[in-house]
Every structure is written in structure tokens, then in C-alpha cells.
Amino acid sequence: MPPALILINPWITDFAAYDLWSKPLGLLAIAGLLRSRGYAVHLIDCLDVHHPGMQADGRSVPPVRRAYGTGKFWRTEIPRPAPLGRFRRPYSRYGIAPELFAEALAAVPDPSAVLITSLMTYWYPGVQEAVSLVRRVHPRVPVILGGIYAQLCREHAVRYSGADLVAGGRDPEAISQTLEAVGAPSSPPAPNDFPPHPAFDLLRDPEYVCVATSTGCPYCCRYCASSFLQPVFRQRSPEAVLEEILHWRDTLDIRDVAFYDDALLVNAQGHARPLLKGLSSRASDLRFHAPNALHLREVTAETARLLHQAGFRTIRLGLETTDFAFRRRLDQKVREGEFERAVEHFRLAGYRRAEIGVYVMMGLPGQSLDSVKRTLEAVRRAGAVPHLAEYSPIPHTDLWPEAVAGSDLDLSEPLLQNNTLLPCWDEEKRARASALRALAREIRRTEACETGRR
Ligand code: B12
Ligand code: SF4
């Protein structure tokens, strides 16, 4: 009998959560790897929207699903944790019922170890609840926690997650060593040199898959943790990425693919360009989405045309702000004029205004409401639609000390790093932010109606 491992994607706990192509790509990559090394891998996805047991659960709000596999999760309102007490709005656990989770745990009789992933730092209550249920069902089995919260808030996770080991390593060898460290039986390495595909086949009825064609990002924006999490920028071969996408189309019959790259278009000549050409010729039945921002500077007439030809339906551009005096101390990724030029390329490539989504950051330390408003208007004028990205202060980023100093909240508590709270704005600005949210919505609505009329 091969040694059994349980891999867990825990619940989200938040004021709001939306499935914008959210899959535990890191955990699935580890699942693929461990499976290729001979382990029997059992995945429990707490965010499973298709769990048959949930139909009978009268306590949760069923998820409305939308275009291209996006939509809501199952949701159950829960009490706000104490540090969020003063924020008077509903707080929920997103995902399957804890009883179904416990049943799935019990169905694996003798696991060697349990591996749990984590994403946003402020979602750690979902991790804690998963660990405590594992303890109840499998009291003597070692629990290993990894992922983004585990890396960004390591000390917090060591103290409060309840896991036996908080792992920082990302590469295959580190994961094998981690398993050995908790006494799980080790297996021989995989028979070939190619890393296996992330195990999307372990998910129930996936409507889409996610792909990362690279790790890291060559830019070093002061508000972003990319260079801490993935210090080396590496791109995979376009052929390997194409092969992975075709594999999932042919085996899982998926139609939508979301790219998780931080820097998809960097070095387009040797990377995105051949990939997009391959997708156009061999995957013309698929739709592609770039929910993580594309770099404006890298958008040329040719890349915009290739993205359109390949079938990219969701485009998000990382503008953040058009207030260049303010941005000078934050990042170097956009220069004046590059945004308008990129939008023009997308328009000429065939995208309608409503299809060109632009991220605008709100809530940065020292950022004024007026600066955000002017950026939203600039997006409208350029012929695109804005999506507000509220700033989440993140440990280990360059901006972190300034964020901590400028916040009226204790940011060492990860729950207060939640972007919804606008942690680095004061009460007055928080109260007036709803007008900016309304403006962004109004611009999107107007452009959608315009598009409908044309
Ligand atoms: C893709 C992505 C998204 C996607 C969706 C991701 C998802 N799964 O839901 C989209 C675009 C929707 C998104 C949205 C947002 N995101 Co985001 N996102 C990312 C990104 C680029 C990659 C995450 C990822 O999946 N990586 C791929 C896998 C391969 O890596 P991984 O999960 O880390 O796994 C590896 C290791 O960690 C480890 N590992 C993982 N699990 C385990 C378990 C064990 C046991 C072990 C041993 C190891 C291990 O091994 C894996 C393989 O190497 C990261 C930045 C980054 N470079 O990591 C930001 C990041 C996570 N996002 C961030 C933010 C701020 C946001 C937003 C709030 C932005 C905004 N203001 O609107 C929203 C919020 C979304 C929400 N409320 O749902 C922040 C985190 C903030 C925080 N406080 O935690 C990050 C770090 C970016 C940043 N600004 O620095 N995001
Ligand atoms: S360009 Fe994007 S991914 Fe790269 S460092 Fe800046 S914010 Fe992070």
C-alpha cells in the first residue's frame, strides 16, 4: 500500500469572496509531484462548489455561478473574530460544511501526514479551523502548513495555526525534506525530469484550470510581495505550457483557462509571443483570462493582436494610478503615456471598451481620495473600465513599515491586513470610499450599456 497523504485547501473567511478563477494552484502542483513520487494523494477542497452533500445543507447560501466558470462560493455567516468586532458588517465562512470536511478526513483511514495550503494572510481562521478538525479526526497524524500566509506571517502561523510544522520551502526537494522531517515515509523521486502537471483532475468537475507560465516578477513594486515570495523571475518553456493546457482540454474537457502569472508579457518575444501563436493555432476552442494584471509597458500592437487572436476574453491591466507624482515612490512599472497607448493597442486589436479592465489601487498610505477619483476618470477617458483593487498591507514588502506607521489598526494582526478594511486610510476616508466604489461601478455599467447598443 503506498503511503497516504491528505492535502487540504482550507475555507476562506472574509466579509466577501468571489471565485475569480480561484484554485489552489500551489497545492495542486504539490499533489501532482507527490503522486508522481508514489504517494496516494487525497485532496479535500473546502471551496468545492459542486460538493453533492451541500445540496442538503439548509444553513448555507448556494453559490450563483457566472460566466467562464467564475461565481460565488457556498457561504455561511459566522461571528466576526474579536479583532474585527468594530467593523459592523456580515462575516462568512466560504465553502463546504465542516461536517462534510470531517467525513472526507475520516474516509482516509491511516494518512502519513496532512498538508494544508494557505492564501491571503487574513484568511487564517479557515486554516485554524481545518487544523483543529484534522486533530479531532486524526489526532496523531502530523500536520504541515505551507503557502502564502505561512510565508508572509510565519511567526503568527507557527504560534497560532496549530500545525506541527510551518513550511517555507517551495521547491520539490524542500517538500520531500519537510515530509521526512515529520516522519512521513519518503518515496523514490519521479522517474523523469519533467515536473508533473498540477493535479487538476483531483478537483470535482473543474470548470476551468489555472496556469502559471512563470514565477516571480522583474519589477519590484514597494506594495507587492512577489519578490519576497518568488525572488527569482523564471519563465517556463512556451511548449511545456501549451502542452499542459492541451492536456487539460483533452482530459477534463475544460473551456476556460486563467493565467496566474505576475509578469505574463515580460520578454514577450521569447515567451508570450510563441505561446499565444501556439494557442491560436492549437487551442482555438478555449477562452483565456488574465485576472492578475498584465504590464502596460509590455503591451505592443502585436501582443494585443495576439492576445485577441488567441482568445483572451478577460484582460486586466495594472495601472494602479495616473497620479505620477504620487507613484514615483511606489513603483517604476508605468510611465506617463504608456497606459493610453496600451488601451489604444487593445482597441485596434478588436477589444471593446468594456472588455479592457484596468486595476486602480485605492487605500495606499498617503493616497488621497481625489487622486483615486482622477485615476478612475482617466481610465474612462482612455476608453477602458476600472476595477478598484483595495490595498492590502503585506509583511515583508518595502511599504510595510510605512503602512504600519500610517494605520490606526494593529497590522501585526493579519485579520487587519484585509484589503476590504482599507487599513491605511483613516475613518473619514474609509467612509467616503463608497463613493469611489460607486463611481467605478457606474463607469463599468455605462460602458457595458454602450457596448450593448453597438
Ligand atoms: C494568482 C493570484 C491571485 C488571483 C487568484 C488567486 C487564488 N488562488 O484565488 C486573483 C487575481 C483573483 C488574486 C486576487 C487578489 N489578490 Co492575489 N495573488 C495571486 C498570486 C499572483 C499568485 C498566487 C498563486 O496561486 N501562486 C501560485 C502557486 C504555485 O504558488 P503558492 O500558492 O504560493 O504555492 C507554492 C508554495 O507556497 C508552496 N505551498 C503552497 N501550499 C503549500 C502547502 C504545504 C504543506 C507546503 C509544504 C508548501 C506549500 O508550494 C507551492 C509550489 O511552489 C500572488 C502573488 C505571488 N506571486 O504569489 C498574489 C497575492 C497572493 N494576492 C494578493 C492580493 C493582495 C490580492 C487581492 C487582495 C488584490 C486586490 N487588492 O484586489 C485580491 C483578493 C482576492 C480575493 N479576495 O479573493 C497578495 C496577498 C495579500 C495578503 N495579505 O495575503 C499577493 C501575495 C500579491 C501581492 N500583492 O503581493 N490574486
Ligand atoms: S509589477 Fe505587479 S507583480 Fe510585479 S512587483 Fe509590481 S505589483 Fe508585483
Image (cartoon, rainbow, N blue to C red):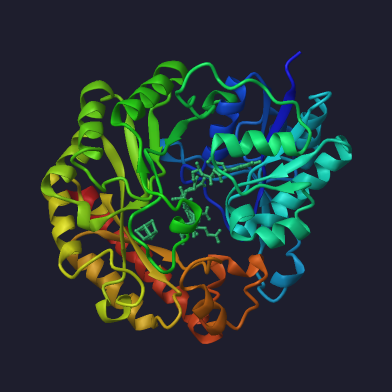
Q: In the image, is 127 to the left or to the right of 317?
A: right
Quadrant position of residue 368: bottom left
| Looking at the image, residue 422 lies above or below residue 46 | below
Quarter of the rendering occupied by the N terminus: top right
Q: What x and y, as percent, mark residue 195?
A: 48, 27
Q: In the image, is 412 to the left or to the right of 241?
A: right
Number of numbered discs on residues = 0
Q: What x and y, as percent, mark residue 249?
A: 40, 21
Q: In the image, is 8 to the left or to the right of 362?
A: right
The residue lying toward the viewer, choosing from 104 and 335, is: 335
The residue lying toward the viewer, choosing from 414 and 84, is: 414
Quadrant position of residue 204: top right
Q: In the image, is 324 to the left or to the right of 348?
A: right
The residue lying toward the viewer, choosing from 366 and 12, is: 366
Quadrant position of residue 189: top right
User: Measuring 15% from the left and 41% from the top, which residue is drawn there?
Assistant: 305
Q: Can residue 350 be seen in this view?
A: no
User: Measuring 38% from the left and 27% from the top, which residue is drawn there?
Assistant: 255
| Looking at the image, residue 73 lies above or below residue 354 | above
Q: What x and y, as percent, mark residue 260?
A: 41, 44
User: Measuring 58% from the left and 42% from the top, which residue is drawn there?
Assistant: 63
- Quadrant containing ligand 2 reads bottom left
Q: What x and y, as percent, mark residue 398?
A: 46, 71
Given the current orientation, which residue lies at the most extreme top position? 1
| Looking at the image, residue 87 lies above or below residue 319 | below
Q: Can residue 82 be seen in this view?
A: yes
